Image (tube, rainbow, N blue to C red):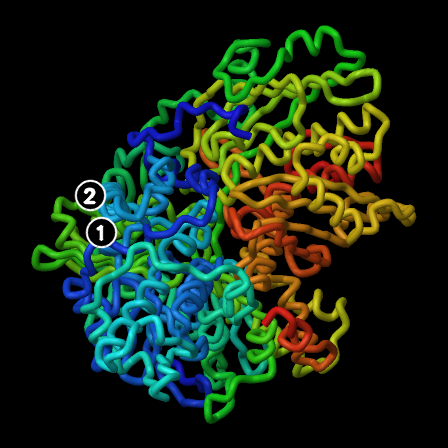
Amino acid sequence: MTSFTLNGQPVTIDADPAMPILWVVREKLGLSGTKFGCGIAQCGACTVHLDGEPVRSCSTPLAQAEGREVTTIEGIAGPDGELTKIQQAWISEQVPQCGYCQSGQIMAATALLRDNPAPSDEDIDAAMSGNICRCGTYTRIRRAIKVAAGIEQPLSERMAGEA
Amino acid sequence: MSDLNSKKERGSLAKWSRRGFIGAGVLAGGGLLIGIGVRPGNPVDALRPKVAAGAGEQLVNSWVKIDADNIVTAIVPHCEMGQGAHSVLAQMLADELDAAWEDVRVMQAPADGSYVVSDTARMFVAPFTMNAAAWIEPTWDGLFTQIGRFTDAMITGGSSSIRSTGQYQMRIAGAAARQMLKGAAAEEWGVPTSQITTRDSTLFHEQSGRSAPYSRFAAAAAEQPMDHTPQLKSPAEYRLMGKSKARTDIPAKVDGTAQFGIDAAPEGLDLSYAAVVRPPVNGTSVTSMNAERAMQMPGVLQILNMGDFVAVVGDSYWEAQQALGAIDIEWSEAESPTRSTEDQFVAFAAALDEAGDDGGDEVAAKGDATSAFADADTLIEAEYRVPYLAHAPMEPVNCTALVKDGKCDVWTSTQVPLMARTAIEKAIGLPKDDITVHHPYLGGAFGRRLENDYVTMAARIAKATGYPVKMIWSREEDTQKGVYRPADLSRHKAALGADGKLVGYASIFTQRHDPAEASVPAMYNIPNTSVRVAASDLHLPFAAWRSVDHSQQGWFVESFIDEAAHAAGKDPLEYRLAMLGNSPRHAAVLRKVAEMSDWSAPAAQDTAKGVAIVESFGTIVAEVIEVDMAAGKPKMTNCWAVCDAGFIMNPDGFRNQIEGGIVFGLTAAMYGEIDLVDGAAKQSNFHDYKMLRMNEVPAIEVAIINSGDIPVGGAGEPGLPPAAPALTNAIFAATGRRLRELPIAKQFA
Ligand code: FES
Ligand code: FES
């Protein structure tokens, strides 16, 4: 039995302690927002927070969650479901294409902005380069992070003529 | 361009296929054609239970549903794989319908014969019917709907959703629905239809001051005659088309609620999970298997020797995958003599050698290339080579299936839901009508999900076990056992006149798939041209890969044109421009990219720019890339792109696609390579099949030229082809080193 907190709720689960958190969350606890991309800590699609720090859940065994807090993409919005600044920026900048990598991107960006509210381009590179986007939305992710940080204007305001 | 193309493939019904479909995209042309979007008759009664069973929902025609709260739903036949088609197709329909955009929703059309994309079938097999007079329309349309059904033409690819389905189906469906709503209101209000106006999902009769929401007349509208050639809006009347409306699928993609194939959780089903391994060498099979140890492992339910693959079915994917690794499997000997990458290229070279100067099959011929080479002041020659590439969509290949009581249901990310159904019919012997394909969002596809290999595997596992099973391929399976963009070798020759101008051009290569004319540099109007193909077998199975033949041909042609420019001692952008006298749209695109990138400004220390221009899928794209070589290897700093797609339906969505195409193209150029070792694909996961990352992509700026309403070009693929040549041309400009082989990164290691 492993007990931990998932998005603020206590859970106790009877699963192999070696099973990666990714599969526990997806298959045993029914939260499918966290994605499988590579299974070897190379792509970041599976990024969740463990006590607030981003980790690759495909390569983090359940045993490591014991007594700790796991946060997934489903758990970052406000109590009334209000989207975070980062999620809102992801919409205003129209970041996602297929969207499959974006849970992981948002989890990585969330940790970045919490620790560094005004990141430079180098800071963004350092925090985000572990996350692959096969659709190639990197330039928009960078912009959305800056919009969420208040460093840049939202696209909707810059593009008024086209809307 | 048509005089350079072989007409053979055109109009042949037999070649209509997934691959034909990709090629078909380029046939879109001519005036805005109307009257082919809606079926003869109005089959709403048959469709209602499938798409409008909700309380208060009314189906006006196959594509338009309106509920009691006046929410308009556009039912779209294409899948959403990141390209934004769902949202833009709805935008086009809603504009013609005069619907209030905030109250428009999108629904994925079910995998049903009623939703075949018949107009693409038609554009491909019989473009001459596209201008049929109105009275004959219902007949033609019925015919092509039948062809579409017969060929399972519910396909997403070829950058075609907007320019075929959007233009010829969704707009007409919206306009027809608006007419029907007006007709129903006119009847009840006892006024002429011509006096009724529409705005924001509301009907108005100004003379009497009456108004009503669409929902009020939705049911009656379905009974109205359906005009197959409704009047469509002119660009001046567009309210939604041409606007950067926010995509409807994005909110669900930022809060984790978007459902992809891999997230399938069908209600009431207790899923088991399957991990699979296919033979390392394509076409071989299991000769023996020892699964004793694996069978004892926790969570394992069944281990299946399916002949062409082995599957472990378990309580969780991870446990199944662990057990799979504990099975000893012997595979049969491969028949193909190709063992290594070098073997493949030796075979390609032999095919080209054998074809010599005039063998192989003609792709395009113009003037007299042979004499042009004989008389040339300067002759240049080059040979280029490109590797196999995997698609590597972010969502690994997967499929969930249940076979029970003579019925089969599958849930999967696919670009071809109806073809998937037919493939399952063949694989497990159930009639098509008893097979249902549920297809949610795709976590990327890029051509990979035009194939049904994985869908049939899941159906077979489900049939063999009786369980509802979710089969997931590991990233390693996905990278090593899939289908590939072919490797190729291409030889080029150019004759330059005394003034440096290109007077002769020839190329020969071994791979020609789609589009048929991807290798032909028609826009440059070179007087003597010979393009030929000497076909050579591929060791790894072929699949369409984002932009298909343009992905390699764009690089071959635009690298070689650059070589010619340098041989002539000319500026490569000016050199191209001088040849574009008959291609004013291309010239305008090139001029604009020169201006945006400040092309003629002196380069900073260690930096240089390269340019390339390619027309593909109806869209002309020129790109300039700037590299910085200070570290002794290329660092991409900036990319400027200019695109002319005729008319852009959603500028921001279009730019997002071009940005993505550029990154996809640059990723392949820098890193993409699948090698062969002992006949098997070598690279296995993102550590050795690398992707560009945040710190490596250049800043990208995309500009659009709306040169006219028609033809509308594609968005998903055209950004890709110019990226690789613009990059290698920039590296040449910076270093004097001409790269004739991809990928780039290892050549600077
Ligand atoms: S799935 Fe965990 S890093 Fe790729
Ligand atoms: S949006 Fe498709 S992988 Fe990032």
Taking the spot 66% from the left edge, 26% from the top edge, the residue there is B525
Q: Is there one chain holding both mark 1 and mark 2?
A: yes
Give the residue at x 18% y 60%. B43
Which chain does the numbered disc 1 sit on?
A: B
* Frontmost residue, B161 versus B410: B161
Q: Read off the residue under disc 2.
A: B427
Q: Is residue B369 above or below residue A132?
A: above
Earlier in the chain: of badge 1 and badge 2, it is 2
Q: Amino acid at mark 2?
A: Ala
Q: For the point 83% across and 46% down, which residue is it?
A: B599
Residue hosting label 1: B459
Q: Position of residue A14 (x, y in %)?
A: 32, 78
Which quadrant is the C terminus of chain B positioned in?
Answer: top right
Badge 1: how crowded within 10 Å, few (<14), some, or many (20+)? many
B148 on left or right of A144: left
Give percent across and percent down for residue B5: 50, 25
- Disc 1 and disc 2 in contact, CB within 8 angstroms: yes
Q: Residues within 10 Å of mark 2 (few under 14, many from 20)?
A: some
